[in-house]
Amino acid sequence: QVLDAFKILFSDTQVKAVLVNIFGGIVNCAIIANGIEKACKKLGLKIPLVVRLQGTNMEEARRIL
């Protein structure tokens, strides 16, 4: 799902940066972080990316990113 979202964002040439803000107890931040990492590698990130993850497994997510 993260990869699909990033494909949509990166396909728009007017997007200058991406902010990902995840806050919650149910969402596993490590899963989101893994998705972000894989999407950036696969799509070749060329714009600034700011990520804020707050919630379950946020320390693990920080290590991943």
Image (spheres, rainbow, N blue to C red):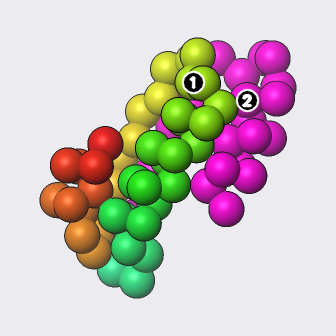
From what the image shows, is residue 4 above or below residue 19?
below
Return the mark for residue 45.
1
Nearest to the observer: residue 21 or residue 41: 41
In this orientation, does residue 17 appear?
no
Which residue does the image show at 58% across and 43% down from the upper left?
39
Other-residue count near label 2 (Cα within 10 Å), few / some / many at <14 / 14–19 / ≥20: some
- Tell me, yes or no, whether the two marked residues, 2 and 1, touch with CB atoms within 8 Å: yes
Return the mark for residue 10.
2
Residue 12 colored in magenta in the image: yes
Amino acid under label 1?
Leu
Of the 4 image quadrants, the one containing the N terminus is bottom right
- CA separation, marks 2 and 1? 8 Å
Q: Tag 1, which secondary structure?
A: loop
Which residue does the image show at 62% across and 55% down from the upper left?
2
Q: Position of residue 24 (x, y in %)?
A: 38, 73
Task: Judge from the rendering whether residue 55 lies leftward or rightward of residue 41; answer left or right.
Answer: left
Nearest to the observer: residue 54 or residue 61: 61
Nearest to the observer: residue 10 or residue 42: 42
What range of the chain is rendered magenta?
1-24
In this orientation, does residue 43 appear?
yes
